Amino acid sequence: MTHLVPATQVRAAVERVALSARPNAPVRPEPDCAPSRPHAIAHTRSALWSAARKLRERQLRRASRRVLERDLATYTTSAEIEDLLGTMRGQEDADAEIIRGILAGNLHGRTHRFAS
């Protein structure tokens, strides 16, 4: 099995060999990559988990919206929609606005993919 060595370590080893051939040459300290690397890996891992969590949340919201559209697709006549909107009077939260938007689409005759 082959073990890959980072380029910075290879360069440092080559410089050490070159410096040993020139004893009076100034010594350059080796780059210290070890402390920053775990931080970068942790940061990348954290960003990936965050992106995965956001993607999952979006998927759940879309699935919830599709279920709601499917349930509300049966309300197609203006009388049915007006009755349902009447029961929602006074509700001003985000969920009520989503329901109103779906019902408005039903009222204007938009075709839903779940309508039977």
Image (cartoon, helix red, strand yellow):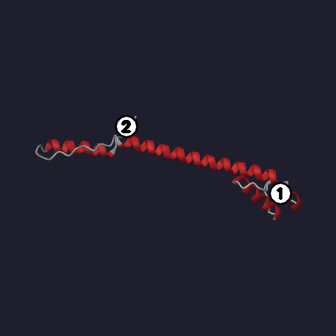
Q: Quadrant of the C terminus?
A: bottom right
User: Which of the two labelled residues, at mark 1 and mark 2, occupies the earlier sequence position?
Assistant: 2
* Residue 111 in view in this figure: no
Relative image position of residue 35 (x, y in whole percent): 34, 40
Relative image position of residue 8 (x, y in whole percent): 30, 45
Q: Quadrant of the N terminus?
A: top left
Q: Nearer the viewer, mark 1 or mark 2?
A: 1
Left or right, 83 with respect to 18, comes to right
Q: Which residue is mark 2?
A: 3
Element at badge 2? loop
Front-lying residue, 114 or 22: 114
Element at badge 1? helix
Q: Which residue is mark 1?
A: 86
Please tell me how crowded label 2 is: few (under 14), some (14-19), or many (20+) other residues with Cα within 10 Å.
Answer: few
Relative image position of residue 62 (x, y in whole percent): 69, 51
In the image as oriented, which residue stretches furthest toward the bottom? 108
Residue located at (79% from left, 51% from top): 70
Residue located at (41% from left, 45% from top): 40
At label 1, the amino acid type is Gly
Spatial CA span between label 1 and label 2: 71 Å
Left or right, 10 with respect to 112, comes to left
